[in-house]
Amino acid sequence: MFRSFIIAIFIITASALCAVAEFYPTTMLAEVFGSSSNTACLDAYAGIDTLHNNYHNGEFISARYYSESDELSNPDAEARVAYYDVNLFPTVIFNGIQTVLGNGVGVSDGSVYTNILQPKLFTASPLKIAITSFSGASGIIQARVTMVSPTYALVNQSFRFLLLDNNVSATATHVVREVITQPITLTGAGSFLDFTATFTTVPSLNRPEYWAAAIVQLDNRSIIQAASTLTQPDYQIRAAMSFSPAITAPANYNYTSLPVYFFNTGLADSYTIRLVRDDAPADWYFNYCSESGECYPGDVPNPFTLAAGDTIGFHLNLLIGGSGTGSFHFLVESTHTAPYLVPFTYQTGTANEDPSLPTADITMLQNFPNPFNGNTTLRVSAKQATQTVEIAIFNSKGQKVKTFCLANLNKGTNDIVWDGTDKDGKQLPQGIYFSQINGVGKTQTRKLLLLSE
């Protein structure tokens, strides 16, 4: 068995490259709301600075909005305070939806913020943003938003440019000076929109400390992508996945995940990857597989090379024994970068519901029956009538095998029957499949078990 794993490593190193992911890593944004007269805010600023020390600008950026703070304040900053209905300083909001209030335990050392940020570093975004030019002298900024997902639809949402100012004083940095908002509607993988704006409210734009950010924000306030003009490392690799790294699934089970994609967002580089056990029951085994189906024992390093912009995907292939909890991580190493970790936890229990999914206006319920042979019903619950959404069916290798379009959802439950066939009407083999709903602000996934007749 060990020898066959080693042989597979050399066979697939090239064939697993240049994978096509239908999402892109999310750059996380922390928006910090405070006042220069509130000393408690200094704790929040110190905690956010800790995150900047631990994560580079491609992974994480922050913006500070000062309220009632003389020259640090401006109408756009006050408008953002009102937009989020902030009434306590400090308030820190991550990607528009996760909020930390005040300056309690764990704020000044950044541990509270780290606990929020770390698992979200691997969030999948349906799009990417590139700021293509920015002039401090003229205030002109340009950016391109590109849709990566073939199914996600942006309809009359908000694209925002932020002008920020560093090192204004000994305690004031990342200060938001101006916010420019434009509407965005974008669908179809590979489609893009170019945005241009001119910052006007700051009298001396040609300061070297000025920089800019761009975000896409939904009506529910969630920020699904961000980018900045800040310097990033020449060499960097990032991971993203469309499922939660906190896994809940049965005991005595062979768990196969959707793909975890690794994106080379820097210069060409060579890496090794392995799946490392941190703490888990002795009868649990942590393996992983390439997109083409070759599998490896987790503790054997697998070499691969990625050109700039290339992507590679792997699936978790876990052999779970008795009940318990376990932790493990992908470890990617290169001579040019610090070790890159993608942590996971696995807890035995009911796998039907993903605890990471928030209550949403549109929710994908578990199919029934499950397991099934013949037909099963895919059910979507909507709090109100709404736009079209898509349900995609994936096999255990992450390959899309079927797509359903639900047009103009009705309020309440909406059902569609799947007969276990692929997009060409051919019967699929027995096995584990995944249904995903897209176009609702956050991908939701459910596991389906198809049995043979």
Image: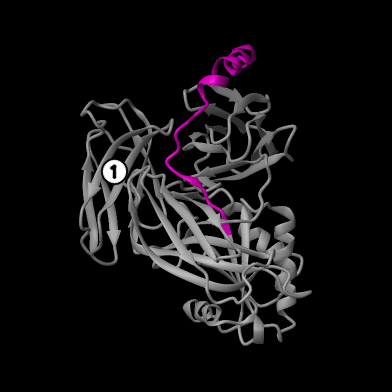
Evaluate whether residue 370 shows in this view: no
* Residue drawn at point x = 60 percent, y = 56 percent: 229
User: x, y percentage for residue 145?
Assistant: 43, 52
Query: How many numbered discs sit on the rendered protein?
Result: 1
Q: Is residue 130 left or right of residue 33?
A: left
Which residue is outermost to the right? 170
Tag 1, which secondary structure? loop
Report the side of 147 relative to 313 (left or right).
Answer: left
Question: Is the residue 293 above or below the residue 73 in the image?
Answer: above
Residue 203 at what x, y percent from top left?
60, 77
The foreground one among 404 and 129 is: 129
Q: Residue at x 44, y 34 (%)?
A: 20
Residue 4 part of the magenta segment:
yes
> Image quadrant for the C terminus?
top left
Q: Nearer the viewer, residue 134 or 171?
A: 134
Residue 445 vs residue 178, the one in the foreground:
178
Residue at the farthest front position: 137
Whole-percent x and y of residue 122?
Answer: 56, 48
Q: Looking at the image, is 21 positioned above or below residue 109?
A: above
Identify the residue under disc 1.
Answer: 369
- Horizontal arrangement in the rendering, residue 253 relative to residue 413 (left or right): right
Segment colored magenta: 1-28
Residue 131 visible: yes
Point out the image quarter for the N terminus. Answer: top right
Query: Looking at numbered disc 1 in the image, what kind of residue is underneath it?
Result: Pro
| Residue 337 point in image, percent of width and height | 72, 38
Q: Crowdedness of circle 1 by 10 Å Cα count: few (<14), some, many (20+)?
A: few
**Quadrant of res 99:** bottom right
Q: Is residue 245 magenta?
A: no
Name the residue at 61% across, 83% down: 67
